[in-house]
Image: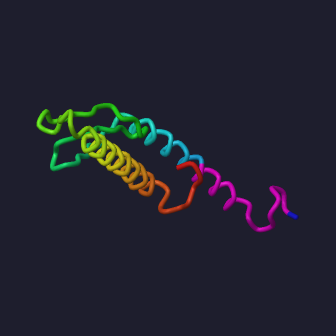
Amino acid sequence: MARGGFPGMGGNMNNMMKQMQKMQRKIEELQAELETREVEASAGGGAVTVVCNGKKEIININIDESVVDPDDIEMLQDLIIAAVNEALRAAEDMVNREMGKITGGLNIPGM
């Protein structure tokens, strides 16, 4: 067996490792950038708006005063849940889309 473990692989294995390291650096840079990006989603025709970042953290919730009805708190709760879930989905989609540009569709766990 050739030095390096795989016969005939020599330089190809080194090139592959360099490419993987380069991809890892790009992924780390993108993750840091995505943490600062924001997505916004709303429910109830804009009655509840939620802003989420690339770390999938809710950073702002805006509630239109017209939907604050003390006799119908359940509707407001439903609108908040819907807007939060949509914002989290949007953040997930943003992260997956941007990571896919780097990984070329490779299924890398944890990305």
Q: Nearer the viewer, residue 55 or 30?
A: 55
Q: Is residue 34 left or right of residue 108?
A: left
User: Which is more toward the observer, 21 or 75?
Assistant: 75
Q: Is residue 47 left or right of residue 3?
A: left
Residue 102 pos. (x, y %): 46, 54
Whether residue 16 is in magenta: the answer is yes
Q: In the image, residue 88 lies at what x, y percent? A: 37, 46
Q: In the shown orientation, is residue 98 left or right of residue 14?
A: left
Residue 17 image position (x, y, % from top left): 65, 52
Kindly identify the residue that appears in the image at 32 percent across and 50 percent down.
86
Q: Residue at x 80, y 56 (%)?
A: 4
Q: Quadrant of the N terminus?
A: bottom right
Viewer-nearest residue: 3 or 26: 26
The quarter holding residue 50 reads top left
**Residue in view at x 49 percent, y 45 percent:** 27
> Farthest residue toward the left?
66
Q: Residue furthest bottom?
A: 8
Residue 57: percent from the left, percent from the top?
A: 40, 35
Q: How is the protein colored in the picture?
A: rainbow
- Span highlighted in magenta in the image: 2-20
